[in-house]
Image (cartoon, rainbow, N blue to C red):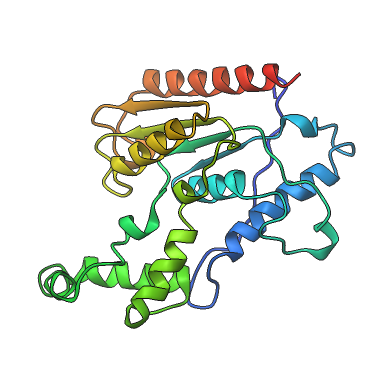
Amino acid sequence: MERGYAVASINYRYVNDSVHFPIPIIDCKDAVRWLHKNAKVYNIDENKIGLWGASAGAHLALMTAYSNNDDFVGDENLKSTNSDVIYIIDNFGPTKLDQLLRSQLNPIVSASLRLFANETYLKRKEKIEQLTGFTLKKKAKATEILKKLSPVNSINHNSVPTLIMHGDSDEIVPYEQSYILNEALKKYKVKCKFYSYKNAIHGFKNISTQEITTISNDIISFIDQITESND
């Protein structure tokens, strides 16, 4: 607030056995539409709205930012309202879900995973079913949906500027997920910055207060740069 930025936190529905994608993305897109619609009420400059997310929230923010204006509509009253944002800040978010969840494993490798790492197998199985609504018995359909839900597959020359931050020792979301995103953005010549943090784990839980301050300053600097260029 001291820097002149208003912050809104999106309350989206979590995936479970009955709530599947794209419902959480619809919630996020509608939230952005609502901000545009009510910008004057809250004295918000709707031409400078951006998104910031971490982990699963970063995935949703990326999908919201990279999808088309009229994609993922939930509330019919917001259907004609703009959902544009001008930047996205991605903190260690999943970007290529079919690779992350290994939905295309062949039967032999999948059976080996189940035998020697059953807990990992069950978590993977549960997450795929919650995200897609399909079991591994319908692997092709599940993989198709996971690809559609992967931000890297929604990037084009018009994608918004993106700031990526990831620790190279992340034990939850592999560092490679951010590398893949950065390469895709560069391919389409989208403005992006990629900050890598040596030995940092998921959530940056093991880095110093000084490093956290540096991260915060880098984020603010990126936002300043993008919003000022949009005056």
Q: Which quadrant of the structure image shows residue 176?
A: top left
Q: Residue 157 versus residue 88: which sits nearer the camera?
A: 157
User: In this orientation, which residue lies closer to the viewer: 151 or 167?
Assistant: 151
Percent coordinates x, y for residue 112 in the rendering: 11, 72
In the shown orientation, is residue 187 left or right of residue 11? left
Number of marks: 0
Residue at screen point 72% across, 29% down: 48
Q: Is residue 3 left or right of residue 16?
A: right
User: Which of these two is toward me, 52 or 108?
Assistant: 108
Q: Is residue 57 left or right of residue 69?
A: left
**The N terminus appears in which quarter of the rendering?**
top right
The residue lying at 72 percent from left, 47 percent from top is 32
The residue furthest right is 41
Vertical side of 29 occupied by 115: above or below: below
Give x and y (percent) for residue 77. 85, 61
Residue 150, located in which quarter of the rendered image?
bottom left
Which residue is painted at 32% across and 72% down in the image? 125
Q: Answer above or below: position of 19 versus 88.
A: below
Q: Residue at x 60, y 23 (%)?
A: 223
* Residue reaching furthest to the bottom: 137
The quarter of the picture where the C terminus appears is top right
* Percent position of residue 186, x then y: 43, 30
> Is 173 rendered above or below residue 209?
below
Percent position of residue 151, x then y: 48, 49
> Hey, which quadrant is residue 13 in on the image?
bottom right
